[in-house]
Image (cartoon, rainbow, N blue to C red):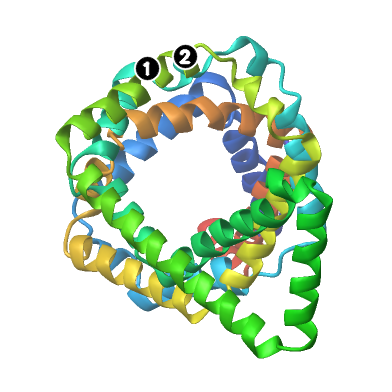
């Protein structure tokens, strides 16, 4: 009997065979050096295209604004965040390296010196801050109240004359009489005393202006600050524990978190986000993505190295969990089981 030829596979059978073959092919491409070479090649090709694409072509300005607003302002913050902040504060507070690391190892001498010199330069930040605080009405009132309270306490409680019974008795009777019989006079006398204190404080504060403008003072103050830095730089980072407890640190973090919750709802933050995005697009909108990456210090080599450093481990994980094969098979199957593909396979087998 003549040997019968094997029947040709049906389009569906051929599609299944191609599906298995292509799935196996791509699974092999995800392993080892093949995957690294594939990733590096694809990144290089993508970067070649990016060199020609501008920021305005790649993304829409309004969409970027909406995304920034969504994550900074509108996104719901889970209830676990405050607890997480507290746990982070505890870890930071008890971090062993803080005891072994000195302040000078974290803040270089050159940086600290430049900061101190900048702080003490004439008409700089410190001058403006001191001047604005010193000349403010609330600060002057505060100093006047402090001086008045101290003098009042000294006159009626600490003065040695008050230790004599007759003087103390007479003073108390005079104060009681003013309070009961002539309250308006008592208030007038106190107001006059406060006005006198305010005038004295104002005169004293005017002397500060001359002091700040004195180069000798400025140089001495800066040298004192530099000498203090020579001491501080030897402190361990954990020295802050002498002034801040673990609970203080946790509470500061919670206060900062609560401030952020309120601040993120303000129109000011929303306008700042929009202004920042507008500026970014004004500066880089017509520039290519390659120029943008170069300006922010991201090179082609950095991108390839980082992706190739993480991608193989991620690919191995996807293979081990079965996600890679399931993903590849699911999406290829949609193609091979489509009517158009089966018709093509059927016509090719005729």
Q: Front-most of 223 and 100?
A: 223
- Please state, as top left, top right, bottom left or bottom right, where the C terminus lies in the image: bottom right
Q: Position of residue 158 (x, y in %)?
A: 71, 46
Q: Is mark 1 on a helix, strand or loop?
A: helix
In the image, residue 38 sits, relative to residue 238, either above or below, namely below
**Residue at (56, 20) in percent of width and height:** 32
Q: Position of residue 259 (x, y in %)?
A: 63, 64
For the image, the number of numbered tags is 2
**Residue at (81, 56) in percent of width and height:** 166
Disc 2 and disc 1 in contact, CB within 8 angstroms: yes
Q: Is mark 2 on a helix, strand or loop?
A: helix
Q: Where is residue 47 in the image (x, y as percent from the top left)?
A: 29, 43
**Residue 107, visible in the rendered structure:** yes
Left/right of residue 16 with respect to residue 37 in the rendered view: right
Q: Front-most of 141 and 66?
A: 141
Query: Gap in Å between the C-alphas at discs 2 and 1?
Result: 7 Å
Mark 1: few/some/many CA within 10 Å (<14, 14-19, 20+): few
* Residue 288 placement: quadrant: bottom left
Residue 336, disc: none
Mark 2: few/some/many CA within 10 Å (<14, 14-19, 20+): few
**Residue 16, visible in the rendered structure:** no
**Residue at (58, 37) in percent of width and height:** 26
Residue 231, disc: 2
Residue 227, disc: 1
Q: Front-most of 11 and 263?
A: 263
* Residue 1 placement: quadrant: top right
**Residue at (42, 73) in percent of width and height:** 65
Q: Where is residue 59 in the image (x, y as percent from the top left)?
A: 35, 67
In the image, residue 319 sits, relative to residue 180, either above or below, namely above
């Amino acid at each position: 009997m003549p040997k019968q030829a094997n029947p040709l596979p049906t389009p569906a059978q051929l599609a299944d065979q191609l599906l298995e073959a292509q799935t196996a092919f791509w699974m092999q491409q995800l392993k080892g050096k093949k995957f690294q070479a594939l990733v590096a090649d694809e990144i290089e090709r993508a970067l070649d295209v990016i060199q020609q694409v501008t920021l305005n072509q790649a993304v829409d300005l309004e969409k970027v604004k909406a995304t920034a607003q969504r994550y900074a302002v509108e996104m719901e913050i889970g209830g676990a965040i405050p607890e997480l902040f507290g746990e982070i504060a505890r870890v930071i507070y008890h971090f062993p390296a803080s005891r072994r690391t000195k302040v000078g190892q974290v803040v270089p001498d050159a940086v600290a010196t430049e900061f101190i010199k900048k702080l003490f330069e004439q008409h700089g930040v410190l001058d403006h801050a001191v001047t604005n605080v010193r000349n403010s009405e609330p600060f002057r009132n505060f100093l006047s109240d402090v001086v008045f309270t101290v003098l009042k306490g000294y006159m009626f409680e600490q003065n040695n004359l008050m230790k004599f019974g007759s003087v103390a008795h007479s003073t108390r009777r005079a104060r009681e009489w003013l309070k009961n019989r002539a309250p308006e006079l008592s208030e007038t006398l106190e107001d006059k005393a406060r006005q006198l204190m305010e005038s004295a404080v104002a005169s004293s504060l005017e002397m500060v202006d001359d002091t700040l403008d004195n180069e000798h003072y400025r140089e001495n103050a800066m040298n004192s600050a530099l000498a203090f830095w020579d001491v501080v730089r030897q402190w361990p980072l954990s020295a802050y524990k002498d002034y801040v407890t673990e609970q203080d640190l946790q509470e500061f973090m919670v206060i900062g978190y609560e401030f952020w919750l309120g601040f993120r709802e303000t129109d000011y933050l929303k306008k700042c986000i929009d202004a920042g995005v507008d500026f970014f697009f004004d500066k880089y909108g017509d520039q290519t993505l390659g120029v943008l990456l170069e300006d922010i210090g991201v090179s082609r080599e950095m991108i390839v190295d980082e992706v190739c450093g993480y991608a193989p481990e991620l690919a191995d994980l996807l293979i081990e969990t079965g996600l890679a094969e399931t993903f590849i098979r699911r999406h290829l199957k949609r193609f091979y089981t489509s009517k158009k593909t089966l018709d093509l396979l059927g016509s090719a087998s005729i």
